[in-house]
Image (spheres, coloured by chain):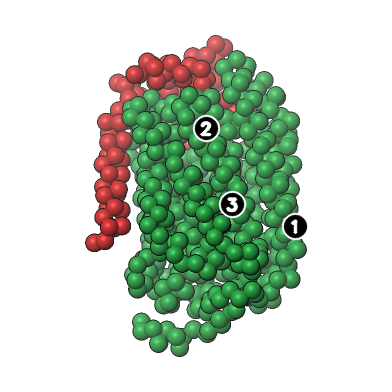
Amino acid sequence: MNKKSIVFVALSICYLLYSAWVYTLGTQGSANSCASDAAAIRGKLVYQKYNCAACHQVFGLGGYLGPELSTTMSQLGKSEDVMRAFLQYGTARMPILHLNENEITDVIEYMKYIDKVARESNYNGSPIAAINFHANRN
Amino acid sequence: MHFHKFQNEIHHDAVQLNYGISLIMPLQKSDKLAKTFLSTAMVCLLAGLIFGLAGGIQYVVPLWMKDSFPFTRLRPLHVSLVITWIFTAASGGIYYYLPRIVKRPLYSVRLGWLHYSLLLLSVLTITVGYFSGIFGGREYLEFPPVLGLLILSYWIVFLINYFSTVRKYEGKWPVYLWMWSVGLIFFAFTFLESQLWIIPFFRDNIVRDTTIQWKALGSMVGSWNMMVYGTAFFLMEKISGKTSVVFARKTFFFFFLGLTNLMFNWGHHTYIVPASTWIRDVSYIISMTELLILGNIIYHWRSTVSEINRYGNINSFRFLSAADIWIFLNLILAILISVPAINLHTHGTHFTVAHAMGTTIGINTMILMASLIFIRENYPRHENTIKVSAGFWICNISLLIFWLSLLVAGFIKSIYQGQLSHQDILSRQIPWFFTIAISGFLFLIGMILIIKSVVKVRSKE
């Protein structure tokens, strides 16, 4: 085995070890990070089924046409009813997605779950709050 | 297969390009396969640009096709087709160059056609699915996960064909063979990783799920960068006529640093995800290097190429030079958005889009266009140079306006985020979205000019 192959194999081993750590200990999060509610898990799949990520972000990841949703459930004026109305009738920019009642309920439960995790980590969807996030974790 | 037998099977069409550059590119049995890949890639690029333009218009005119063909369909169509362009053009280039590098025919042209058939089937299925609003996957890979099996299967076919061919190469591997090999392997790995979400252990923890999604996608971008940059190194070697750079110790040092970036620098996508802070720290340390490395190599390569060689393959050279400039611009942006204190403000804004567009269009597309034109100019026909030149300038100037407008839109959001409502921020960004749509349209026109020229020459062959 030549030197280049040795470097390649060594890097690959480091990468696999790092990946294993990321898959487990590095991403455990808090006790609330794991969804225990079946409705929230279903809601995540509904979120994917309608490709909500094309326009919305969760933890800053997703499209930018619609607002960040990480803490939308606990923001002023964004009650469950308001969220239900958005999902049912759309907005000036958001199309009517024709979700059924169960799907709407599941998405709301998913939003509540994300909100709980985000709030716990002091993230409120704006960069200013995110500054505190890592400070608190450290 | 014995080399002499191989020689009998191919038609030697050694071409002496202008200005004395000796560039032997004999015709291969697999050339039709390679050119079919390249043609399909061009169709995907044009279709992807059209959907991107339509999405840009929806930013400015929200009611336009809002319910009949919403942004939720336009965006994945745009993204998936443009990514397909990059992969397919890079794969077509590899199919074209590899037998010439190895001096042996492709291991199996039949496997190559199987690869193409499965690719075409997956592109058509996914595109029709997106048109119909059938999703179920994740951002950038929105198709139902079962279709991932199609992608995985054609990639395995490609891996078999590639490695069965390249193992016959005699002597030390030049850097581009390393880059292609690593790119191909890591795409397979990261694609599998991107589908881990179907397992509840990964899916049901939002922190784990989000982090791994971006780990996979971040490294997947690195994998296609390896394929594209490998192509750039091959072109550089052929245009300059110098082989030393692709075997140089310094080049390999930078290649391995690039590989380290592919493996570990994805974390800047997830700085604000509440995972371990180690992920951020590792990423921050490593992410400072990647584009700087390549920019450095290309910069030094350029300084060694003589004027005559530059003009000998002028169109390819121009596109590689444009990629140089885009590397420089994206290098600055990449460094800035990788600094955690700055990332907190730029993350979730169009700064990220500017970085993505600068990389996929400015760097990847310019290099792949150089490759397409290089393959075209293997034949001594230059009658479309003016059109290619016009297209080149239209594309690059419009892309610069596009890129700067994205930065301004991102800057506006980063200022007002947390202070104004989303709708108010959007209304302040509208003039810049308008500029983005117009410059996107001009880019499409420029690209049509270039592609039309390439296709015109091919149709005459």
Label for residue B43? none
Residue B69 position (above or below residue B366): above
Say few, some or many: other residues with alpha carbon within 10 Å of mark 2 (under 14 / 14 to 19 / 20 or more): some
Residue B379 seen in this snapshot: yes
* Same chain, labels 2 and 1: yes
Check disc 3: other Cα within 10 Å, few if <14, some if 14-19, many if 20+. many
Q: Are marks 2 and 1 in contact (CB under 8 Å)?
A: no
Quadrant hosting residue B71: top right
* Residue position marked by numbered label 3 in the rendering: B323
How far apart marks 1 and 3 lie (CA) works out to 17 Å
- The chain coloured red in the image: A
Viewer-nearest residue: B392 or A83: B392
Please give the name of the residue rendered at 46% of the width and 18% of the height, measured from the top-left corner.
A131
Which kind of residue does numbered mark 1 sit on? Answer: Ala
Q: Which mark is residue B390?
A: 1
The answer to whether B440 appears left or right of B177 in the picture is right
Mark 3 or 2 closer to N-term?
3
Answer with left or right where residue B207 lies relative to residue B31: left
Q: Which chain is disc 3 placed on?
A: B
Residue occupying the point 71% across, 47% down = B397
Q: Residue at x 44, y 62 (%)?
A: B246
